[in-house]
């Protein structure tokens, strides 16, 4: 990646993917609240320390959030369907 995108662009892509992963997979209210609390502080720190990759990655993740949340919903419904079919197998025995 470093050769193709450079170090800074690679960091931006890493942060973007990290935000998408966290938003897609965090389901506990407490964890989401902690994420929302610390995010602005971390973004400010990254900007003050002249490392804007975190903030850029966050803003690049925003247009992709719709797809990430749709996949989260699809995975949840698939999980529910597979659990129902697994439970029906055990009920027959």
Image (cartoon, rainbow, N blue to C red):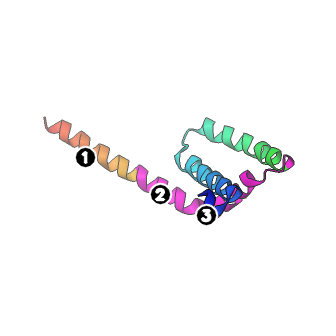
Q: Which residue is mark 2?
A: 71
Q: Residues within 10 Å of mark 2 (few under 14, many from 20)?
A: few
Q: Which residues are magenta?
A: 48-76
Where is residue 71? Give x, y as percent: 47, 57
Determine which of the numbered discs, if any, sits on residue 85 in the image: 1
Name the secondary structure under disc 2: helix
Q: Which of the pair 25/76 is nearer the observer?
A: 25
Q: CA distance from mark 1 to mark 2?
A: 21 Å
Q: Residue at x 82, y 47 (%)?
A: 44
In-image side of 79 versus 1 (left or right): left
Q: Which residue is mark 3?
A: 4
Q: Residue at x 63, y 42 (%)?
A: 32
Q: Is residue 16 magenta?
A: no
Mark 3 vs 2, N-terminal side: 3
Q: Residue at x 86, y 47 (%)?
A: 48
Q: CA distance from mark 3 to mark 1?
A: 45 Å
Name the secondary structure under disc 1: helix
Q: CA distance from mark 3 to mark 2?
A: 28 Å
Looking at the image, how many numbered discs can be counted on the residues? 3
């Amino acid at each position: 990646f470093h050769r193709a995108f450079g170090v800074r662009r690679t960091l931006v892509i890493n942060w973007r993917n990290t935000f998408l992963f966290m938003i897609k997979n965090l389901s506990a209210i407490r964890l989401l609240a902690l994420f929302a609390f610390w995010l602005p502080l971390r973004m400010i720190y990254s900007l003050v320390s002249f490392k804007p990759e975190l903030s850029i990655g966050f803003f690049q993740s925003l247009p992709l959030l719709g797809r990430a949340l749709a996949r989260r919903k699809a995975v949840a419904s698939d999980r529910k369907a597979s659990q129902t079919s697994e439970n029906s197998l055990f009920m027959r025995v």
